[in-house]
Amino acid sequence: MNIPIYQVDAFTDSLFGGNPAAVCPLDSWIPDDVMQHIAAENNLSETAFFVAEGEGFGLRWFTPESEVDLCGHATLATAHALFMEMGYSKEKILFETRSGRLVVSKEGDRLKMDFPSDPMPQVEAPPILFQALGIQPNSNVFKTDDYMVVLDSEAGVAGLNPNFRMLNEVNARGVIVTAPGDKVDFVSRFFAPQVGIDEDPVTGSAHTKLTPYWSDRLGKAEMEARQISKRVGVLTVRDKGERVEILGKAVTYLKGEITV
């Protein structure tokens, strides 16, 4: 069985930036264990698989260790592959996913993703969270499936050097750390050793949580964001109430074929 594969750098306008994702178009769904093996072999933070279904596409995402419910950068990468490499000509792409319907469209030279908003209630964090991050405890902690820790400065986020073995013991999908940005509205980093990714370079799904928080705090509906990993990701986000729009660019790094 031969499967096409694209590797796309998402949330960047230049190669070797943003977050790389593999994208595999399928004629029909293949066994879950095969998709999981392919994702592990690719050894990227996410591999996306999609199949034409109805008026759009079924879309699934796998880390090297597990399937996940939502992945922003691999959705952006998939839309980029469809629009730029596969000749998709409609104005919008409809994806049916574990997180419901996701819509991606073009806006100028960027792609715009329409995702469900995921506001996070404030919680009391376990001491191990602060210990793993190497910071003093504070009360600015929020949680849904991820924890979100809010710091005072971009420098504080940039200087983090987590203990990933300890962080893996935290009961969450991952941990977002965020602060006001020096040159943008806010910055963040995302750590997820629980799903096999010590640090994700750019995390679209985290911005479904970051956007409502910063929109409320800053009193702004549209904001500029940077995920300050080593590769750096650049995003524009818009708070639309129950939905969040996430805009970014992407570039193709690789086109090939997998033999399974």
Image (cartoon, rainbow, N blue to C red):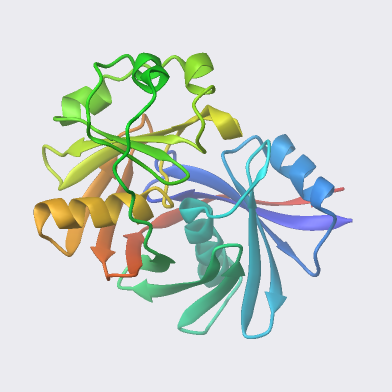
Where, by quadrant of the figure, is residue 127 drawn?
top left
Residue 196 lies, with reference to residue 208, above or below; the image says above
In the rendered image, residue 193, in percent from the top left (x then y), is placed at 54, 27
Say left or right for 241 vs 127. Answer: left
Can see residue 13? Answer: no
Can see residue 238? Answer: yes
In the rendered image, residue 56, in percent from the top left (x then y), is placed at 61, 79
Q: Residue at x 85, y 55 (%)?
A: 31
Where, by quadrant of the figure, is residue 148 drawn?
top left
Q: Residue at x 15, y 39 (%)?
A: 181
Depth check, front residue: 236 or 23 = 236
User: Looking at this rendering, what residue extends furthest in the front direction?
Assistant: 124
Q: Residue at x 59, y 45 (%)?
A: 46
Residue 202 lies, with reference to residue 164, above or below; the image says below
Give the total of numbered labels. 0
In the rendered image, residue 29, in percent from the top left (x then y), is placed at 80, 64
Say left or right for 53 vs 188. Answer: right
Say left or right for 108 vs 170. Answer: left
Depth check, front residue: 7 or 115 = 115
Depth check, front residue: 93 or 114 = 114
Quadrant location, the N terminus: bottom right
Q: Residue at x 12, y 61 (%)?
A: 220
Say left or right for 233 vs 87. Answer: left
In the rendered image, residue 249, in percent from the top left (x then y), is placed at 37, 58
